[in-house]
Image: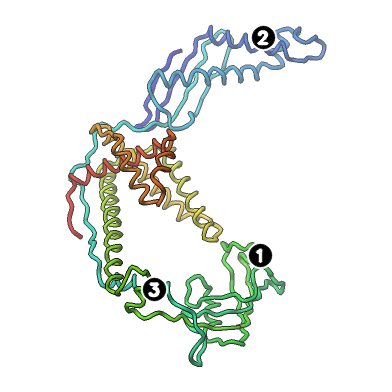
């Protein structure tokens, strides 16, 4: 077997493989011998049909099968011999297979680009402030008040308004026909909630118990209910009750209700400030790392294999669809979102290749203590038991993922140590 290698681009390689004629003849003879033992041909006993009859009836199929077998056997050997690692299945262009003649084919496939140097020193980024402002603290306190609020009957003569909970009996119909599973009794809706259609929000605002109102909503094509999707749906409401959300006072008693460990409101504020500080520092570190990675890609515009970009894009699209379905949406990816995912995927692949190259060029390795530290961080992030995580990551594939994560963080630490950082 002879293999000529041509590099069509930094990420595209073509093999020109030639297999000797005697090997071709041998494989053809084997194929006809096997065929003669099994072929049933009218006028001949099994296994007794002449070769020329077999060639006339089965010649093209035999040639195709032999060519495929020769390619399947020779390509992995050629890859090992040339010490390359294809990223995708090769595109094969075979020549005609003939008895006694050499057989050749071209195999084109993608490879990781050879990266001999990476410019990663003096990358630029700005540190994001991590100071906990009074406004941020007050926002957290307000969220806690909302979480500990109660729903009380209206204490004044007024109609429903934003923030109120309206309990209704709901009927939904399309073209005069009820859509039973879209309505129901004692359905509670919160006014001011962004999930409500504007028409429903408008018609329920100002209502009181005993009122009956209706409105028509043009439902979006993406609505998960098949009978409502893209239809003009009539919503009929019989208002049964209106309750207002009552927020607790911001005092020491409120702090104790949040957690018995807090004796005073100041104790709660201190804990919230501490939690916010940790969250801001983590977010700031992530943003700093992303800025450095963006600058790394900008200063090293290496070509990326399209197959890796497609793979990353497909993974991201699956995650987007799964997230949409968890939120009760149909999960359709439009052209704009698909284009954005493709661009982000190319950046992710480029960053991954550059980080791997830095690790190789700087001879950065990962030891067991660093893997153990990585597991501890993972346990903190996921809330999983460290012993269970150790057992999970004994699996070779899971361990490889962990090594990659820890190695990436180590490279990012190196990049950050050499970066030009400014305060935002």
At a point 44% along the width and 35% down the height, the residue shown is: 395
Query: Mark 1 or 3 closer to N-term?
Result: 1
Other-residue count near label 2 (Cα within 10 Å), few / some / many at <14 / 14–19 / ≥20: few
The circle on residue 257 is: 3
Element type where label 1 sits in the image:
loop
Q: Report how far apart the C-alphas of labels 2 and 3 lie in the structure.
A: 87 Å
The circle on residue 227 is: 1
* Label 1 with label 3: CB-CB less than 8 Å: no
83 w.r.t. 160: above or below? above
Residue 185 seen by the camera: yes
Residue 82 drawn at (x, y percent): 38, 20
Query: Mark 1 or 2 closer to N-term?
Result: 2
The residue to which callout 2 is attached is 33
Q: Report the quarter where the C terminus lies.
A: bottom left
Residue 302 seen by the camera: no
Q: Is residue 284 left or right of residue 256?
A: left
Closest to the camera, between mark 1 and mark 3, is 3
Q: Report how far apart the C-alphas of labels 1 and 3 lie in the structure.
A: 45 Å
Q: Is residue 130 left or right of residue 253?
A: left
The quarter of the displayed image where residue 212 is located: bottom right
Q: Report how far apart the C-alphas of labels 1 and 2 lie in the structure.
A: 62 Å
Nearer to me, 343 or 224: 224
Residue 300 drawn at (x, y percent): 27, 41
Element type where label 2 sits in the image:
helix
Closest to the camera, between mark 2 and mark 3, is 3
Q: Is residue 351 left or right of residue 28?
A: left
Closest to the camera, between mark 1 and mark 2, is 1
At a point 67% along the width and 67% down the height, the residue shown is: 181
Other-residue count near label 1 (Cα within 10 Å), few / some / many at <14 / 14–19 / ≥20: some
């Amino acid at each position: 077997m002879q293999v000529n290698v041509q590099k069509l681009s930094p990420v595209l390689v073509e093999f020109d493989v030639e297999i000797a004629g005697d090997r071709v003849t041998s494989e053809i003879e084997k194929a006809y011998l096997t065929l003669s033992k099994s072929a049933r041909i009218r006028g001949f006993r099994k296994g007794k049909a002449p070769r020329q009859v077999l060639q006339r009836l089965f010649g093209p199929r035999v040639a195709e099968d032999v060519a495929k077998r020769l390619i399947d056997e020779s390509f992995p050997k050629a890859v090992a011999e040339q010490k390359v690692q294809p990223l995708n299945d090769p595109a094969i262009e075979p020549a005609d297979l003939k008895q006694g003649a050499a057989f050749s084919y071209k195999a084109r496939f993608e490879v990781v680009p050879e990266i001999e140097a990476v410019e990663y020193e003096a990358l630029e980024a700005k540190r994001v402030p991590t100071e906990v402002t009074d406004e941020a603290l007050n926002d957290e306190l307000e969220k806690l008040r909302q979480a500990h609020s109660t729903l009380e009957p209206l204490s004044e003569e007024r109609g429903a308004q934003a923030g109120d909970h309206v309990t209704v009996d709901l009927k939904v119909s399309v073209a005069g026909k009820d859509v039973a599973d879209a309505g129901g009794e004692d359905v509670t809706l919160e006014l001011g909630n962004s999930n409500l259609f504007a028409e429903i929000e408008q018609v329920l605002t100002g209502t009181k118990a005993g009122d009956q109102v209706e409105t028509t909503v043009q439902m979006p094509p993406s609505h998960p209910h098949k009978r409502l999707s893209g239809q003009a749906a009539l919503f009929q409401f019989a208002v049964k009750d209106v309750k207002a959300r009552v927020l607790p006072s911001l005092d020491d008693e409120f702090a104790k209700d949040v957690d018995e460990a807090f004796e005073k409101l100041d104790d709660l504020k201190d804990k919230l400030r501490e939690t916010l500080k940790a969250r801001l520092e983590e977010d700031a570190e992530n943003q700093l790392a992303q800025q450095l990675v963006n600058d790394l890609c900008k200063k090293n515009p290496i070509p990326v294999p399209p197959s890796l970009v497609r793979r990353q894009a497909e993974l991201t699209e699956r995650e987007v669809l799964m997230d949409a379905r968890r939120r009760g949406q149909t999960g359709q990816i439009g052209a704009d979102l698909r284009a954005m995912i493709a661009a982000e995927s190319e950046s992710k692949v480029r960053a991954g290749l550059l980080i791997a190259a830095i690790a190789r060029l700087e001879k950065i390795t990962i030891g067991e203590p660093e893997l153990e530290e990585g597991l501890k961080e993972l346990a903190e992030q996921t809330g999983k038991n460290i012993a269970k995580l150790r057992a999970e990551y004994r699996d070779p594939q899971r361990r490889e993922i962990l090594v990659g994560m820890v190695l990436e963080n180590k490279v990012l630490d190196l990049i950050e140590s050499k970066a030009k950082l400014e305060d935002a």
